[in-house]
């Protein structure tokens, strides 16, 4: 699996962060598609996981993503009021308020976690978002706290 | 029943008859207006700029003193009522301002006193039916226009004594006294207020509108609840008479004078002689005296 | 061990230019469970699909990945192809290496694109391994519709559905259908007489064999879901047997008692046994029980004596009927804001201050004055009429913040009607803005001003009071910057259009949403304007917000077409992306119930043989569930999961990141 | 009249100051004119209440300062009471008065007030008048 160690980072000279994106099917996924059909270019560090709605996102997904080597996580869905499922994104937001503290408690640096709204037409916003987050996380360096946790647990 | 009472500076001097007639009427009905042991002028204006907290310290002081004597405070003058009621609301609802104001007056007052106008006491605490029962000299046949002015009613959210566009409290009291209330268009319009100081023309016009509107609607008498309204209407009387064809004037008295009259108080005690307009001819004509 | 095939598409050069598709295919071959890989120029082309089907059969694949364009593009294509080859379509997953990779990373050395494509494909493969075959959900559809509200919107919907050959039950709470339009005199922008265009439609609705009219009735309870609703309807007692009544009107003629006519808005009285207006449909009178002395104290009974067919029954009681329908159209309309709230305008106190709707009645030839404009106080023809717009509308403080949309237009209409009827009269209109967006609407307003001499004053009225038999209007004309006073004979208030009283209770019965003004929410204000979030329930007309007749009718037809589309098949197929509850772990905390935006989760009791409830469980109604997954994240005991997006599937993807 | 609109004036410090001390958001006013229609002294004002709001929206505070409107306002609150947007022109005018008075500039010289008035008028009129006109 592609878990980097401090060695690989140092070897390559430049650290390339891995970003996991949880996006909703209707708005942000379509927005990212539009970036593609418009042939925009953005940093290749992001891997998208499509979900029906941001309301589907379990906080565990994020913890797991970090555990599996993500240096940053992006959660993005429809704008408030535009949710395909009317209120799913509100649920997501409300849940977040509660879970934020838990995340902080589990040692996740909140600067590595980003929430955003990207609609199906906001390709440019998507591109900017991915670029910005990649650069920010790059500046923060690799997320080491969780690295190897899984391997340790396996042992 | 004993109700803490704030006369205010004007009722202590200029409008003595307003004050005395009310106190006598109260005791005739069976309760006492107990003057606060310590009080000061309320400032006679509620500052409209919300940052002007220093202007609230005078009324806050009055309220804080009242708080020491009971949980209600009654007033007669519409302006005092307006200033005290609104200040009280600020103190009750706005924590930050409360702290600052309490700092000014060096007291710990939290807005808990219930500020009532005398009309509210009569309506809600005594009940107009009880007032009616105490009437000995009904004002039968007197078409009376109740002049509310501005301060008693506005702003509605703060004052809440009655519907700001179509109030009834005054008229209902008049009915209880046996009079015939007349709703006239200008009863909630301004008399000119403090412009009395430097703009007689405007005051004459506005007060004139009030009086001619009342008379035009059939009123033979106007009652007020504010010494400034009383002053402006009475002061403008002659000029309006001379400039308005067909208008011959109308007596203006405090509503408490009308109340005292109806309750059968001795005429001499009502202070009519201090009024500029003369109500006696009307009373004689109607056979009340 | 699964048998997975991976097909990497080159999309001509679209993908191949920056992704080494061959390398991707080769790398994937190394993963456990992957038994077949290839790359190909155009996967979606016919040869591409043929190849795919072939490979499935030859390699006995039980799952397949197409690494190509966005699933929004060709997921359906490839799932269909998989199905044709005998595979469960949901065993086919797409990896998006075009929109998410080749098109956005322009590195022609192919290094970046190849690595990312490998990552993405690997994640999809791991996810696929956790897939379960899914079956499309089939829901049988009852091909009968219920329309609630018999205004013009509801009538239109009912007629269109009936014309499409389906049965409709039209429920109206008043004794007659027609709604607010029945009150109007002439209608903008064409000025045709409202009755002339409405009455034929009402009669058509009555005569249409496919339509069952249930007037004087209200919906009590709604159960079920799209295709399968069970509705209980209360039929209030009319005290008149509808079947036998001939509509002769003898009873009305002879009834000795009168009371205020709600239809005439206080401008006239009606008998205790009555039809709301002469053209009522059905033409069957009802007895206003609270005002009938016979019913209250057993005195009178005149109507029953004169009725030839003997259809009056003073003992008649309310009835509940149950109907099964597949779709519901809600068209319950609007009412006007009670003007009493505006003390400064004297409504309810000054007799000659009336509402716009009352003016309609004065102008209507079937109204209380026979169409002559006469003021209520003394019946005089008013020479100066002031119209005040935006009364209660656009008034955050004492009214509603929105614009009522039709009053600018109907006020212009009123000035015309007035001018046509009182040639020497002068009308004044106080307005803030004139909102005349619509075909020929602006021209209509200009005509009122330029041709029919309406004096438009830009400003609001502050106060209206009475003086010497005149109604004095005091306001401002902001364009000249002056205070204005008009000695009017009559004042007409364009009062705000608000939702029906009880709109919220009905919405709760139906499980549809409403805004803070209790107007019903459409699914999407632009793209799904007549649907609600509850599948199978549609909206039409002013129950959604202020609108005029053309819009209400368009919506009635739109809702009908949605219903007919739903009824076009015997069964409805739904994507099987729905939630399901694990009965052994659910602890009935109902967190999912409150979280679900569609109220798709029910509380189910589990009973023992004696019928005692031993346990409560959450149960997802698949007909209602939309597959958002909110419940899954809400459940703390991990007892709900979402088919197609199970925790297992998502974690598999994350773990292979 | 022709006026030139300037961004600097629309967002000027004095406009912000006025909004702060009066507690009113000038942008809320949609110029319906209700206040001007109902104001008892509108006829006497050089700039009517709703126009005061408009000039201030345009950043023309000087125009308003020159006018008599703020000194003629009787504070009857009819404007506020009927404003559909909940704006208080009364508070805005008091804010304008206050900006003058707080600078220590009097509108009325006490010495000029007629003795007749000071002697005969109710105390409250004198107190109130001083508050409105004298720093
Ligand atoms: C004064 C005035 C003049 C107008 N003039 C024009 C004009 O000239 N031209 C124009 O295009 N538009 C005009 N309009 C607008 C027009 O009235 C509406 O667009 C139209 O009537 C809306 O029809 P509707 O079917 O949506 O609602 P409604 O007419 O309100 O019909 C709703 C029906 O549903 C029934 N109902 C309500 N609740 C229930 C329930 N719970 N169960 C059963 N039944 C229920 C009601 O009784 C009613 O019959 C005017 C509006 C006003 C106020
Ligand atoms: C500047 C601007 C901003 C707008 N912003 C909004 C907004 O924010 N929100 C909103 O709701 N609305 C907005 N609108 C309005 C919105 O654009 C229209 O309501 C909507 O696009 C209309 O869609 P349509 O399908 O009727 O027509 P069109 O979009 O014009 O589509 C008609 C199609 O038919 C094709 N066609 C024409 N003739 C023929 C022919 N003879 N044979 C075959 N094809 C033909 C045309 O090529 C075209 O593709 C805006 C309009 C403008 C001008
Ligand atoms: S399947 Fe998609 S990526 Fe492949 S050729 Fe077709 S459009 Fe292009
Ligand atoms: S019984 Fe009732 S409805 Fe019939 S005629 Fe008498 S009052 Fe009218
Ligand atoms: S008299 Fe009988 S048949 Fe005639 S309308 Fe009345 S109820 Fe119907
Ligand atoms: S349609 Fe016209 S009158 Fe009606 S609320 Fe809107 S702007 Fe006011
Ligand atoms: S949230 Fe989970 S445990 Fe609670 S009722 Fe729903 S399924 Fe059962
Ligand atoms: S998936 Fe969404 S719609 Fe379905 S039951 Fe769960 S919360 Fe409700
Ligand atoms: S009433 Fe209010 S909104 Fe209307 S012009 Fe005056 S301040 Fe502005
Ligand atoms: S408070 Fe001032 S501006 Fe407002 S209505 Fe009264 S006099 Fe006019």
Image (tube, rainbow, N blue to C red):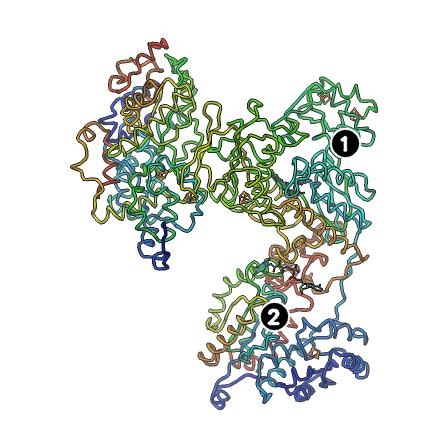
The single residue placed furthest to the left in the displayed view is D111
Number of residue marks:
2
Query: From the image, which quarter does the N terminus of chain C lie in?
Result: bottom right
Q: Does the beta carbon at disc 1 come under 8 Å from ligand 5? A: yes
Question: Mark 2 packing: few (<14 Cα in 10 Å), some, or many (20+)?
Answer: many
Q: Report the side of C375 relative to A13 (left or right).
A: right
Left or right: where does residue A53 sit relative to residue B79?
right
Element under disc 2: helix
Check disc 2 and report the residue beneath it: A29
Q: Secondary structure beneath disc 1?
A: loop
Q: Nearer the viewer, mark 1 or mark 2?
A: 1
Question: Is residue C86 at all visible to an observer of this figure?
Answer: yes
Residue at image location 66% in from the left, 22% down from the top: C258
Note whether residue C1 is visible: no
Residue B73 on image: x %, y %? 32, 32
- Give how far across and how far down residue C18 sits, in percent: 61, 85
In the rendered image, residue B108, in percent from the top left (x then y), is placed at 28, 44
Which numbered marker is on residue B198?
A: none
Q: Chain of mark 1?
A: C
- The CA distance from mark 1 to mark 2 is 57 Å
Is the residue indicated by label 2 positioned so its CB lies within 8 Å of ligand 3? no
- Judge whether B82 appears above or below C378 on screen: below
Left or right: C451 with respect to C26? left
Quadrant for residue D9, please give it.
bottom left
As rendered, which of D122 and C191 lies closer to the eye? Answer: C191
Callout 1: few (<14), some (14-19), or many (20+) C-alpha neighbours within 10 Å? many
**Circle 2 marks a residue in which chain?**
A
Look at mark 1 in the image and give the residue it sits on: C283
Q: Point out residue A141 in the picture as x, y percentages from the top left corner.
A: 46, 81
For residue C518, above or below residue C252: below
């Amino acid at each position: 699996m592609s878990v980097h160690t401090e060695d690989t980072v140092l070897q390559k000279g430049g650290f390339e962060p891995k970003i996991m994106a949880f996006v909703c099917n209707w708005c942000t996924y379509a927005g990212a598609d539009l970036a593609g059909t418009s042939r925009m270019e953005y940093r290749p560090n992001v891997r998208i996981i499509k979900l029906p709605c941001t309301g589907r996102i379990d906080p565990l997904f994020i913890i797991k993503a970090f555990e599996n080597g993500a240096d940053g996580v992006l959660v993005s869905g429809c704008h408030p009021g535009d949710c395909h499922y009317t209120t799913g994104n509100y649920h997501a937001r409300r849940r977040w308020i509660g879970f934020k503290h838990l995340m902080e408690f589990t040692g996740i640096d909140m600067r590595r976690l980003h929430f955003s709204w990207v609609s199906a037409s906001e390709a440019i916003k998507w591109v900017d978002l991915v670029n910005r987050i990649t650069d920010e996380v790059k500046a923060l360096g690799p997320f080491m706290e969780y690295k190897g946790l899984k391997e340790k647990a396996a042992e | 029943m004993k109700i803490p009472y704030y006369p205010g500076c004007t009722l202590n001097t200029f409008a003595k008859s307003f004050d005395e007639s009310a106190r006598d009427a109260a005791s005739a009905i069976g309760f006492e207006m107990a003057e606060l042991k310590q009080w000061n002028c309320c400032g006679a204006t509620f500052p409209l700029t919300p940052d002007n907290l220093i202007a609230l310290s005078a009324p806050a002081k009055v309220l804080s003193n009242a708080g020491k004597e009971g949980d209600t405070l009654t007033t007669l003058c519409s302006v005092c009522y307006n200033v005290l009621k609104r200040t009280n609301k600020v103190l009750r609802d706005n924590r930050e301002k409360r702290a600052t104001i309490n700092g000014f007056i060096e007291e710990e007052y939290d807005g808990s006193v219930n500020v009532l106008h005398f009309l509210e006491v009569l309506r809600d605490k005594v009940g107009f039916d009880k007032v009616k029962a105490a009437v000995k000299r009904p004002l039968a046949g007197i078409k009376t226009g109740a002049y509310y002015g501005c301060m008693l009613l506005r702003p509605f959210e703060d004052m809440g004594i009655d519907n700001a566009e179509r109030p009834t409290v005054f008229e209902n009291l008049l009915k209880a006294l046996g009079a015939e209330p007349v709703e006239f268009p200008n009863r909630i319009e301004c008399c000119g207020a403090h412009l009395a100081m430097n703009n007689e023309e405007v005051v004459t016009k506005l007060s004139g509108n009030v009086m001619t509107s009342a008379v035009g609607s059939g009123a033979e008498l106007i009652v007020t609840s504010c010494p400034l309204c009383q002053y402006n209407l009475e002061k403008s009387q002659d000029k309006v008479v001379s400039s308005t064809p067909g208008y011959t004037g109308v007596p203006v008295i405090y509503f408490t004078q009308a109340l005292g009259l109806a309750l059968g108080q001795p005429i001499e005690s009502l202070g009519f002689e201090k009024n500029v307009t003369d109500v006696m001819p009307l009373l004689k004509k109607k056979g009340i005296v | 061990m699964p048998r997975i095939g991976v097909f990497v598409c080159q999309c001509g050069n679209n993908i191949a230019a920056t992704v080494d598709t061959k390398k991707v295919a080769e790398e994937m071959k190394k993963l456990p469970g992957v038994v077949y890989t290839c790359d190909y120029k155009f996967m979606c082309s016919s040869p591409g699909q043929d190849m795919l089907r072939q490979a499935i059969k030859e390699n006995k694949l039980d799952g397949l990945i197409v690494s190509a364009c966005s699933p929004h593009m060709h997921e359906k294509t490839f799932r269909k192809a998989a199905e044709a080859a005998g595979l469960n379509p949901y065993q086919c997953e797409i990896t998006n290496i075009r929109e998410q990779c080749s098109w956005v990373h322009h590195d022609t050395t192919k290094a970046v694109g190849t690595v990312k494509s490998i990552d993405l494909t690997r994640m999809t493969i791991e996810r696929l391994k956790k897939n379960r075959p899914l079956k499309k959900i089939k829901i049988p559809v009852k091909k009968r519709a219920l329309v609630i509200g018999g205004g013009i919107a509801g009538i239109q919907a009912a007629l269109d559905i009936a014309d499409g050959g389906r049965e409709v039950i039209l429920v109206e709470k008043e004794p007659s259908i027609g709604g607010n339009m029945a009150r109007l005199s002439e209608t903008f922008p064409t000025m045709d007489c409202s009755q002339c265009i409405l009455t034929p439609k009402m009669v058509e609705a009555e005569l249409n064999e496919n339509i069952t009219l249930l007037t004087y009735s209200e919906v009590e309870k709604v159960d079920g879901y799209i295709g399968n609703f069970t509705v209980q309807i209360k039929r209030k007692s009319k005290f008149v047997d509808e079947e036998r009544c001939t509509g002769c009107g003898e009873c009305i003629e002879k009834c000795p008692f009168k009371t205020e006519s709600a239809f005439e808005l206080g401008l006239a009285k009606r008998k205790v046994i009555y039809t709301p207006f002469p053209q009522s449909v059905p033409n069957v009178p009802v007895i206003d029980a609270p005002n009938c002395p016979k019913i209250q104290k057993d005195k009178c009974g005149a109507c029953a004596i004169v009725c030839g067919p003997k259809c009056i029954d003073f003992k008649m009681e309310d009835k509940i009927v149950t109907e099964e329908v597949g779709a519901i159209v809600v068209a319950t309309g609007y009412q006007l804001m009670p003007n009493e709230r505006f003390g400064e305008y004297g409504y309810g106190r000054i007799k000659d201050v009336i509402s716009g709707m009352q003016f309609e009645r004065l102008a209507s030839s079937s109204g209380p004055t026979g169409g002559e404009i006469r003021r209520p106080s003394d019946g005089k023809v008013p020479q100066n009429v002031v119209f005040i717009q935006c009364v209660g509308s656009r008034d955050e403080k004492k009214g509603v913040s929105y614009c009522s949309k039709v009053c600018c237009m109907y006020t212009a209409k009123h000035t015309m009607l007035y001018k046509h009827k009182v040639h020497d009269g002068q009308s004044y209109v106080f307005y803030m803005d004139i909102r005349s967006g619509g075909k020929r609407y602006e021209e209509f307003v200009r005509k009122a001003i330029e041709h029919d001499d309406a004096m438009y004053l830009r400003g609001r009225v502050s106060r209206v009071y009475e003086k010497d038999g005149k109604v004095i209007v005091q306001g401002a004309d902001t364009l000249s910057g002056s205070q204005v006073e008009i000695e009017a004979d009559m004042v007409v208030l364009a009062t705000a259009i608000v939702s029906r009283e009880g709109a919220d209770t009905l919405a709760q019965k139906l499980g549809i949403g409403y805004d803070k003004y209790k107007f019903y929410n459409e699914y999407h204000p632009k793209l799904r304007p007549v649907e609600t979030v509850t599948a199978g329930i549609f909206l039409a007309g002013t129950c959604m917000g202020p609108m005029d007749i053309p819009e209400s009718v368009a919506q009635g037809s739109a809702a009908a077409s949605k219903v007919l589309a739903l009824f076009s098949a015997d069964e409805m197929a739904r994507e099987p992306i729905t939630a399901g509850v694990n009965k052994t772990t659910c602890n009935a905390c109902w967190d999912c119930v409150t979280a679900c935006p569609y109220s798709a989760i029910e509380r189910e009791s589990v009973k023992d043989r004696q019928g005692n409830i031993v346990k409560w469980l959450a149960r997802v109604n698949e007909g209602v569930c939309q597959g958002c997954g909110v419940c899954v994240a809400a459940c703390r005991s991990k007892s709900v999961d979402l088919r197609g997006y199970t925790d297992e599937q998502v974690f598999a993807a994350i773990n292979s990141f | 009249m022709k006026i030139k609109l300037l961004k600097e004036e629309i967002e000027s410090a004095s406009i912000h100051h006025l909004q702060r001390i009066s507690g009113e958001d000038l942008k809320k006013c949609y110029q319906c004119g209700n206040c001007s229609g109902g104001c008892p002294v509108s006829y006497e004002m050089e700039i009517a209440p709703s126009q005061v709001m408009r000039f201030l929206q345009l950043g023309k505070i000087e125009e308003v300062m020159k006018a008599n409107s703020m000194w003629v306002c009787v504070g009857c609150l009819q404007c506020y009471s009927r404003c559909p947007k909940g704006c208080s022109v009364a508070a805005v005018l008091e804010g304008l008065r206050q900006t003058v008075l707080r600078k220590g500039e009097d509108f009325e010289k006490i010495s000029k007030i007629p003795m007749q008035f000071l002697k005969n008028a109710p105390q409250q009129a004198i107190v109130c008048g001083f508050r409105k006109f004298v720093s």
